[in-house]
Image (cartoon, grey):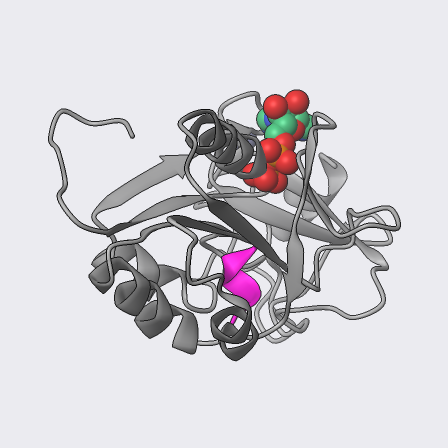
Amino acid sequence: MSGSFQITGGWVEVVAGVMFSGKSEELLRRVRRATIARKRVQLFTSHLDERYAGRFTVSSHDGRTADAIPVDSSQQISQRIDPMAQVIAIDEAQFLDAGVVSLAADLAGRGRRVILAGTDTDFRGEPFGPMPQLMATAELVDKLHAICVLCGGPASRNQRLIEGRPAHWDSPTIMVGGHESYEARCRACHVVPKRDDSQATLPFGVSSDMKQSSR
Ligand code: ADP
Ligand code: ZN
């Protein structure tokens, strides 16, 4: 564990950030190091991650993988917890229900190290699922950044594109079917048009026409 202080008993760690910021890489690194330390580790991932090929794995965008137990609710995690596990790692935590917050606290209270990775904001830039509560109640939080594909600055937003165009604000938080794509962008380059007010999310002094023609 990083940090200059020692925690006795269990604790909760959160690895947050946008897509492509390296959360899965960091989660897999922590899992690998816990395994090297001969800890008993369990790795869970939500069903909604489509990056597995045949087996359920946690995959990072750089191609590293580890076998993971697929779940789509906090209840499924609690049913599948190995009572001997010392480290519980959960990827794609943003898709889980609010019960994951009390589950993490409960496991930490029983001496476990709980590591959760998740996208902290949705495509609108709003807090995503249980991530804000997890980040507020964890002992350790790391917020990672990707690289903005437009300007090269630190990216803190998930840009959703549908047929190459920025998705509207009223597009669903979780899309089923996978026709959308995502880019990592910074606050200034992130675009979320609103149907009734297309100017609302654009930076001051930039008209929606300018914004469209620069893409
Ligand atoms: P996350 O779990 O946060 O989505 P991953 O750990 O799966 O991230 O992937 C991180 C990797 O994605 C980086 O190490 C890099 O190789 C790659 N990558 C692709 N696009 C970007 C980007 N725009 N910014 C940073 N890394 C990117
Ligand atoms: Zn940018």
Residue 159 x %, y %: 63, 47
Residue drawn at (12%, 33%), measured in percent from left and top?
A: 6
Compared with 142, 151 (above or below) is above
Ligand 2 location (quadrant): top right
Magenta region's main secondary structure? Answer: helix
Numbered marks: total: 0
Kindly indicate the quadrant of the structure image that contains residue 108: bottom left
Residue 22 x %, y %: 55, 32
The answer to whether residue 189 of the structure is visible from this angle is no
Residue drawn at (58%, 47%), measured in percent from left and top?
A: 158
Q: Is residue 161 left or right of residue 187?
A: right
> Would you say residue 42 sits in the magenta stretch?
no
**Quarter containing the N terminus:** top left
| Magenta-colored span | 92-96
Residue 25 x %, y %: 56, 31
Residue 167 x %, y %: 70, 60
Q: Nearer the viewer, residue 173 or 2?
A: 2
Q: Nearer the viewer, residue 138 or 192?
A: 138
Residue drawn at (11%, 30%), measured in percent from left and top?
A: 5
The answer to whether residue 81 of the structure is visible from this angle is yes
**Quarter containing the C terminus:** top right
Q: Is residue 4 left or right of residue 117?
A: left
Compared with 73, 151 (above or below) is above
Q: Nearer the viewer, residue 120 or 66?
A: 66
Q: Is residue 68 left or right of residue 205?
A: right
Residue drawn at (42%, 63%), measured in percent from left and top?
A: 83
